[in-house]
Image (cartoon, rainbow, N blue to C red):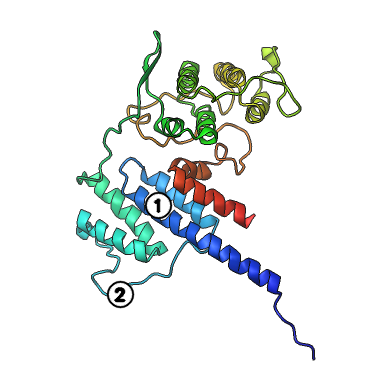
Amino acid sequence: MARSFPNPTRRHSHLLNQRIIMPVIDNIRKEFLAALKDTHYESAELWQTLDSAAAHTADLWQPHEDEDPTTAVDGTRTNWTPKYFSRQAFLAERNFSKERVTHLIEVRQFLRERGDKGFVPGAKSRPQKVSVSEKSGTYNPPEVLAKFVNEGDLMSARTALRLELNDNRLDSFELENASHWVKSHFPDFYEPFIEKEFARGFDPDEGNWTPDYYGKQQVFLKANFSEKRFLHLVEVRGHLRARKAKGFKSIVPSATSRTPSVRREASHTMPASTDPERNPALKAVFLLGGAFAVVVVLILSLIK
């Protein structure tokens, strides 16, 4: 009877992927634990990010370990103190188990609601304030956008600006100010306007400005990231908001909704996809920070 042997090429590929992916997973774990200690992230954003990371790799979690009663997960809320949180976070660095990490999010939220020092979000400073026009006075860019612009990360900055279009709390004037701010701080941010196969021109007839037309223009913006295209999208978006088109209705921001550095996406009617601006979970991953976004995106590319 002939013996079967494992395919050496397949085995080599598997081992190579393991060597590549494991350091990436380690980085995801470290970045997430760092985010846990940042008071400006809401629990919902952490849950969303964790779900997205776990969904794309089966190796994110480690088997849960409780060596002794002093390291065990304690379900008694009266024992949940900042010191207890710090101890569990320290243990999670060595044992990134689902039980321990999800418990940490719950403890963190409890301490936030109780008002413990070091867990209550405070005012987060902006990297820079820039006057973009007499009418607007001082414009405060969203922190994520400012971060990428200040780092000179062109692709991430463009993505961050596109995401602003999806925030139904923003009016056209705020989006125009965002565009002016980016342009003044990043001279090469925009490309010259051109028309080509995947970046067609504009329809001047406002009667044809539908959500479908808006979606197509978003695709064209990616192919030709010009100022003219972005401002056209702002104009079409304003038209759809005025018509109260589904998915474009304006939302009045609450007193606190504009302060967190990570904004929730106000979804339009386009279908969901792996594009971060169409997928709230991936957007949360992307906005949590450069390193965290990079490692998750790398995982996605490796497992496709």
Picture layout, residue 96 above or below residue 208: below
Q: Is residue 201 left or right of residue 172?
A: right
> At 45% from the left edge and 47% from the top edge, which residue is drawn?
291
The residue carrying pointer 2 sits among few (fewer than 14), some (14 to 19) or many (20 or more) residues within 10 Å by Cα, namely few
Q: Which residue is mark 1?
A: 32
From the top left corner, tell me how far across and down residue 63 is, in percent: 43, 70
From the top left corner, tell me how far across and down residue 294 is, in percent: 51, 47
Q: Quadrant for the N terminus, please.
A: bottom right
Q: Is residue 200 left or right of residue 61?
A: right
Picture layout, residue 134 above or below residue 12: above
Q: Amino acid at mark 1?
A: Phe
Q: Which residue is mark 2?
A: 67
The residue carrying pointer 1 sits among few (fewer than 14), some (14 to 19) or many (20 or more) residues within 10 Å by Cα, namely many
Q: Quadrant for the C terminus, please.
A: bottom right
- Residue 262 lies in what quarter of the image? top left
Q: CA distance from mark 1 to mark 2?
A: 23 Å
From the top left corner, tell me how far across and down residue 85 is, in percent: 26, 57
Q: Amino acid at mark 2?
A: Glu
> At 53% from the left edge and 29% from the top edge, which residue is drawn?
166
Q: SS at mark 1?
A: helix
